[in-house]
Image (cartoon, rainbow, N blue to C red):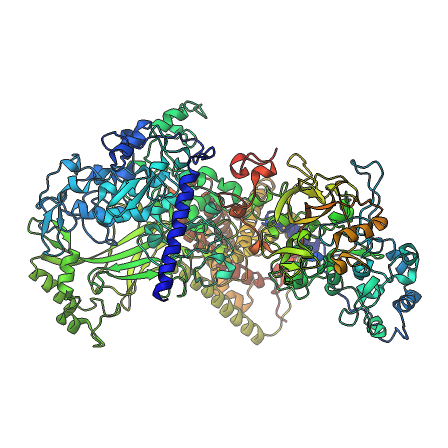
Amino acid sequence: MNKTSTKLLIASLLLVAVMIGLGTVYAKPEAAPQTQASPLHPTFAMLDADGNNVLTSGNPVSTMQTCGQCHDTNFIQAHAFHSDLGLGDYAASKEINASNGIFGEWDPLTYRYLSQPGDERLDLSTAEWLMLNGYRVVGGGPADTSRDGKLLTNVKPDAGNPEASILDPETGEAKTWNWNESGVMEMNCFLCHTENPNLEARLEAIKSGDFGLANTATLFDSGLAFQTEDGFQWNQFAFQENGEINANRVFIQDPTNANCAACHGEVHPDGDVPLTINACDLNYPQTATTGQVIAAQKISESGVNLSGKDDLDRSWDIHAERQLQCTDCHFAPNNPAHALEAQDANPDHLIYDPRKLEIDEYLERPDHNFARGVSAQFRIAPELKSTMRRCESCHDTNKSHAGWLPYNDRHMQVIACETCHVPQMYAPAYSSVDWTVIRLDGSARTECRGVEGTNTATDLVTGFQPVLMQRTDLEDGKTLFAPYNLITSFFWIYEDGNGNLRPVRKTDLEAVYLTNGNYAPDMLSALDADGNGKLSDAELTLDTEAKQNLIAGKLEMLGLNDIRIYGQVQPYSINHNVVDSKSATRNCATCHNADSRVTSPILLADSAPVGVTPEFVPDVNVTATGSIVNENGALYYNPVNENDKTYIFGHNRISWIDWFGALLFLGTVVSVAGHGTIRYVVARRHDKRTVETKPVYMYEVYERFWHWLQTIAIVMLLMTGLVIHRPDMFGAFSFRHIVTIHNVLAALLAINALISILWHLISGEIQQYIPHPYGFIDQMIAQAKYYIQGVFKHEPHPFPKSKERKFNPLQKITYLGLLSVLLPLQGITGMMMWMVQKIPSIQTWFGGLPFLAPMHTLMAWLFASFIVGHVYLTTTGATPLEAMRGMITGYEEIETHEPQAS
Amino acid sequence: MKNRFPFWTLGLIGIILVILVPVLYFLPRADKPANDPYAGLPEHPVHVDHKDIVQGEFKTGQDVTRACLECHEDAAADLMKTTHWTWESKAFDVPWREDDVTIGKVNQINNFCIGTQGNENKCMSCHAGYGWEAGKETALAQEENVDCLACHADTSVYGKGTFGNPAEGVDLLAAAQSVRVPTRENCGKCHFDGGGGNGVKHGDLDESLYFPSENLDVHMGKLDFQCTDCHVTENHQILGRMLADNYTIDPTEQVSCEQCHTNQQHEDERLNTHLASVACQTCHIPALALEDPTKVFWDWSQAGLEGRVDDHFTYLKIKGTFVYDKNFAPTYLWFNGDNEYRYILGDKIDPTKPTYINKPAGSIEDQTAKIFPFKLHIAKQPYDAANNYLLQPVTSGEGGFWTTFDWDSAFKLAAPITGLDYSGQYGFTETYMYWPTTHMVQSSDNALQCDDCHGENGRMDWEMLGYSGDPIEWGGRK
């Protein structure tokens, strides 16, 4: 473009600008009745910190003064953990963490450490902490109050006080910070209560340390104020004559999902614009740490390069799709429209207590301690944990799972809704952060799961399956499997001269690794395996003790004591990105299988400093009962559900029971096969002989009915039980159907047994089963001898069968044991396993399912073995099939007492 | 005992029953839909090849028809009872007229090419008959004038010309030998190109459906439906009625999703709660004119300008200016299947306000009405400025507007034909015509989801539909 045309372009642009400007100005006087931006909120004056109208003072706005004209801003600030951020809980500590909020609690992801008073080395002063974390600081709390409760503006500049100083990057020394010059940040109401807060302008003000401007900068796009070269100016035209803002500038609204997203993570309100995600971007902390994305858009229509995307024709989050707002579950606790009934505070008979705040009372003093869940990663305001609306506050699981999920109650006793309804995350999330090394750009070596690379638009995004861990709910004390992402971090810690345990400062780490913007020569010689003068992520790992010693030595030379590497694993709760029933996990075999979802391992870190086993962070409601294993340098967390006192049918088994049972069964088979073979061979060697027999009506109709019903039921129970026990070997069967068949058969067997007891009692046939004590052992020995010797020689049965005495002594004792001990025991253990869903306390008897289920299995093996022996011994009658015929037709040919050889 | 009946088998049967009955009773059953839509999947049997049956020689279309009637004796008589022949509905008693009225291309107007009267040379190329010119009654009455080939011949060997006669140069023998069950091509010739070109009239029917992709229409694309699979035909009476050419429509005369999708419940109960108020089409036809654009605006007042360059999609001298649109959201109205109003030639209008050529019936209070997607076609078309009614010009006919570009003479020419006085003064007024949308159906993976209608970015104008606000917050209709 030549000069003339450039000039022309500028001139025409100017002309357009002037015309637009004129148009705006001339349009002003005839302003038609303005449409009110907010349907409810009245117009108001903008006041500065002194309570004067900003139009006259030209000062930045004070939210406490402005909003305080009607709302009790002091009350709001005092009831807002979003503002407090841990300040109220702050207590200087020799340990690393000084509070339970981000102000004072160290986060290895952001790494920089908020220095405590008395720390030998200054890392983050309050001012620099604000600059770095400001994007998720609402204001108030640590942004305007000191750790001992003074106004920050009253804290005198002091290079020795981490609250009134800042680290000078040039010198590496602390220099003073003057809060009266920088100003402080009051709680920023506009951040959450306006439609389009200017986040960029606010962040720019915070990052440059111009804290006093931050809240006003939030309004830069609203038309009320605009940025100028030397600061900002209020827009006179946006105000009425009485000093209040114009009605069309009243942009106050209830917080939307987008407002919450400003600090929390990826929220995508627009259905048409394809959603894009930055992989593991800490500006979207919730998404970067968990992969959670709040969007109504179908995953298949997003801009993420997801594998199998076409089939993911459902929204990212069903609740977002169904137009729920964050505040629907995370509401202000005293909001009369949302408040949950604190039922336990009421007399038992009272279902609903209508005494609530009036809406005006609520609007004056809305409680900003929002209802929250029991996430593992946020420790702030523990007293408010589990105050929010949870799945079961809205959904009736019995109704929603009716008709297809067997044992609904049992599943609800052990599995959180999220486990099946958040089956997979489709956005990447951090898996590990290794601060024992440092990249050239000053970042840690990080690993991101769910993406093959870093760019979610061009690299393949696979998403990841959260790991299931035991979550203890505070409200009811239930322990449930729930999904988590695990982020493992490694970092150096040291003890400073004052005995405080501190993470090594980033600046010290850089001093060790870097010189003049490049890696130090000794670092290159130690780490640069391919000798190209650069350190790739693969090379940036302290995988030998020599490398670790080198770094530790250099850190010690900087004056740090007791240098060591610490590794920790932080679970991050996953509760959003819920899917509806169609997409939820609903295949029984997902969990009830050898390869169970419940015990799916999760990668902690592809590579880790050698010899460091990370520890789970303490004091969270998540119990890590699994084990951390090292496979070729990669660390995995393997859940072990047996440690959680759970027993997953089809997955868990006690191997010795199965070995013992199988050997017993095989042993029986081999024994009868051997016995039978010998009998057969011996019989062939002997001459044929005929035996005098006579037909006897041995079994009544009912006896036979009872026996065969029992036979079929037991055999089918054994077979269905085997499928339930080893679904991995019998994948062709539907687990759900087999379980139902097993239960119905068990009920039939029990009913059959009860009726037969009655029949045997009434008919007196019960006596057949009761051994006559006198000489019984001798009789048993005689019968056993017969089976070992006599049977081969065709000797007569020592206790001939008759209608009055059907059973020989061994049969008597076996049947008695079988029917009065084994069968009832098997029934009782089975029944208890079945009833545990309605009577959860069964789980606490004799060790619950982990005891009952293996017992049941053991007895099943005994039954199976018995059947083999029983069937075999029926062949010892007059002819091999005679006893069987008797049990079928009732008539059996019985040998007469004088067998004759022919 | 040898030959005794084995009574134990009875026992065995009893035992099996005792086990089987409770097991089957308790076995969880998958909730199968009471009706399987795939049962309605059409079968397309091979049609009898007429190549060796039909013998020439044919000089005129009527020769062909006579040959057809030798075997298909009742075919012409049956067809002549249908609107494909009469172009006229049954008589309706409409509240704004004393006498009963009939509606159809034969006597009424639309807001595309306006009307057929006096324009038979062009318009009748879509009539299923031959030789409809002046003295139409005699031509109509002849069975031999039924054009069998229009619907039954292979469209690659048969086409129609002026007055509905076979186009010049058509090999009638080849056409007659190619006859078969009508395909999308046969129906499409008139229904895809109605209004003077591809996709002009319907937003949901255009030439993209000749070879539809899977995502264009689940029935025609994925499952290769032909038109007559849903527009079931008996004795040449084709199921389905065009809303604009009727006042009320008996539901039994209309095609509906429920022909196959009876009791079709969604797995999601929340979706099922919509069924009382939302038509299937509303969610399953998220957008119109997916591939080929359709006309949404037509300004006749700009026709006849000297010097303006013709362009198919924006301006034609003979027709005026247009706006075409593609892949856009329909207009949603309450709809119970009928028209609340259909403009009848001679109806008075208020030229300062838009005139409805047709207005679908239904409101939020009407429990039989559901929210339904429409293509709205807006036109500026001529009216008599003194008499305040819409005019029908002679356009394609002899001495018509398309040759003279003189509106005045076109109206004068039409007056004796339409029987409607022309005062000599004319103007142009805005008219609305609503076209129900029921094709280009999408399967569930492409259907609308909650946020398409509900929430801040939703496409529904709830208050216009009569709700207090988004029913997700304000509740549905009572």
The answer to whether A901 is drawn above or below residue A648 in the figure is below
From the top left corner, tell me how far across and down residue A828 is, in percent. 47, 45
The front one of A140 and B396 is B396
Residue found 58% across the figure and 40% down from its top: A758
From the top left corner, tell me how far across and down residue A6 is, in percent. 36, 62
In the rendered view, does B14 fall on the left or right side of B45?
Answer: left
The front one of A99 and A836 is A99
Res. A377 visible in picture = no
From the top left corner, tell me how far across and down residue A498 is, in percent. 7, 48
The front one of B304 and A102 is B304
The answer to whether B471 is drawn above or below residue A264 in the figure is above
The front one of A495 and A245 is A245
Q: Quadrant of the N terminus of chain A?
A: bottom left
Q: Quadrant of the C terminus of chain A?
A: bottom right
Residue found 48% across the figure and 65% down from its top: A788
In the rendered view, does B171 fall on the left or right side of A145?
Answer: right
From the top left corner, tell me how far across and down residue A836 is, in percent. 45, 43
